[in-house]
Amino acid sequence: MIKLSENVQRIAPSATMAIDARAKAMKAAGEDVIGLAAGEPDFPTPPHIVEAAKAALDAGFTKYTPAAGIAELRAAWADKIGRERGVTYKPNQLIVSAGGKQAVYNVVHALAGAGDEVIIPAPYWVSYSDMAKAVGATPVILQTRVEDEFKLRPEALRAAITPRTRLLILCSPSNPTGSVYTADELAALAEVLIETGVPVLSDEVYDALVYDRPFVSIVSVNPHMYELTVIAGAVSKAYSMTGWRIGFAAGPQHVIDACADLQSHTTSGPNSIAQKAALAAITGDQSMVEVMRQEFDRRRRYMVGRLKAIRGLACFEPTGAFYAFPDVSSTFGQRYDGQVIQGSMDFCRLLLEYEKLALVPGSAFGNDRHVRLSYAASMAQIEEALNRLERFVERID
Ligand code: PLP
């Protein structure tokens, strides 16, 4: 038997993708499954973006591009990201990657290795800890509290930093909790980072999706953070372009250069046609972004209202991204159809089996008391999903 490397043996498959695949397989087999497990907008990609891709194809733009992305896209994105955050990025301070995921992975790989520590507040996006493990580093998971809206407190950050700490990964707006850091909260964390010299990878994939409060990047809250921040983002969520696979990382030039070197040896750069589409997305008409944001907001209010009304569930108010993260732990130790619910995995397994509703167990995000529902689905699906969830919880005894 061929032996796998130690780094690869330490990682687990993405739980969200696995659950989504199971729900899709059940659906394909003719079952009436509702999937609220995937983090994917249900809107089509806006037509002017699709047209730009068609034009690229017709123009024969089908060859390798520079490994770090085409110059126009690097320049336009660096300008947009910097302008929106009140800092200046030169085009070579931004690398275009195959989705936000590759951008995040490149940065983790460029900054951490064997024996290093990467601080990750929980609940966290599924891939961070496995990415740290994949490069041989140790993820240091810091639990946050619902009372703090699941945000990392500066004293907890300070206590976790050791001489081996190479990186903090922060995600705001957050997947899975939907919480959004304020400028004051980020400034308090920034103070600790500046004092200790620890850099932050700020995952801002959901920057366009905030409700009731503004989006703030940690790079904006203190001038010293410019040298310590690497931002990751993508066109995936804001422009409903998940399948196009275009994201970016922006930050100090030597970090971006290292990511570009790495990328040149792994993928040779992002897809040429998708880069032209992304250029149209970020430089073209932005009105669809706001239309989608408002629709997500409407669904958010509806979903959270319904969740709060379900007996025994407690739901924290999300203010960003497109997820709700209710606490279902009051059902633990009780039975559904004679089967004991011992944790979020049992809850989701029984819910999928009996009510054909796919959610993600909080255990996938480092918090077993909660489950994640995505409201990136049609209102009709959300309504039916909540009817099913309500019925499921009512039958627990
Ligand atoms: N970061 C977070 C927090 C995400 O939720 C996701 C996607 O679900 C990504 C990064 C990756 O985005 P992309 O689809 O552009 O790779």
Image (cartoon, rainbow, N blue to C red):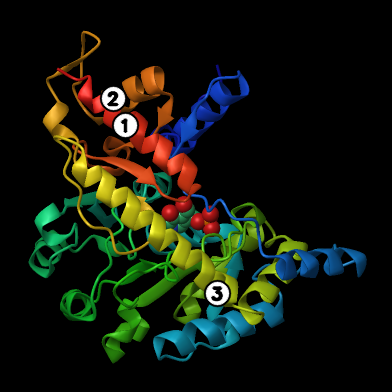
Marks 1 & 2, CB-CB < 8 Å contact: yes
- Amino acid carrying mark 2 in the image: Phe
Badge 2, how many Cα within 10 Å: few under 14, some, many 20+? some
- Amino acid carrying mark 3 in the image: Asp
- Residue occupying image coordinates x 57% and y 25%: 27
Badge 3, how many Cα within 10 Å: few under 14, some, many 20+? some
Residue indicated by mark 2: 392
Residue 128 or 397: which is nearer the viewer?
Answer: 397
Under tag 1, what secondary structure?
Answer: helix
Residue indicated by mark 3: 257
Residue 166 lies in what quarter of the image?
bottom left
Marks 3 & 2, CB-CB < 8 Å contact: no
Residue 108 seen in the figure:
no
Tell me the distance, in whole angstroms, between the alpha carbons under discs 1 and 2.
Answer: 5 Å
Q: Taking 139 as reference, is 383 left or right?
A: right
Q: Taking 290 as reference, is 149 left or right?
A: left
Residue 348 or 264: which is nearer the viewer?
Answer: 348
90 vs 201: above or below: below
Residue indicated by mark 1: 389
Residue 15 lies in what quarter of the image?
top left
- Amino acid carrying mark 1 in the image: Leu
Residue 204 or 296: which is nearer the viewer?
Answer: 296
The percent position of residue 50, horizontal first and vertical second, equals 75, 63
Question: Which of pointers 3 and 1 lies earlier in the amino acid sequence?
Answer: 3
380 vs 220: above or below: above
Quadrant in the picture for the N terminus = top right
The percent position of residue 375, horizontal first and vertical second, equals 41, 49
The percent position of residue 263, horizontal first and vertical second, equals 61, 61
Under tag 3, what secondary structure?
Answer: helix
Residue 211 lies in what quarter of the image?
bottom left
Q: Which mark is residue 95?
A: none
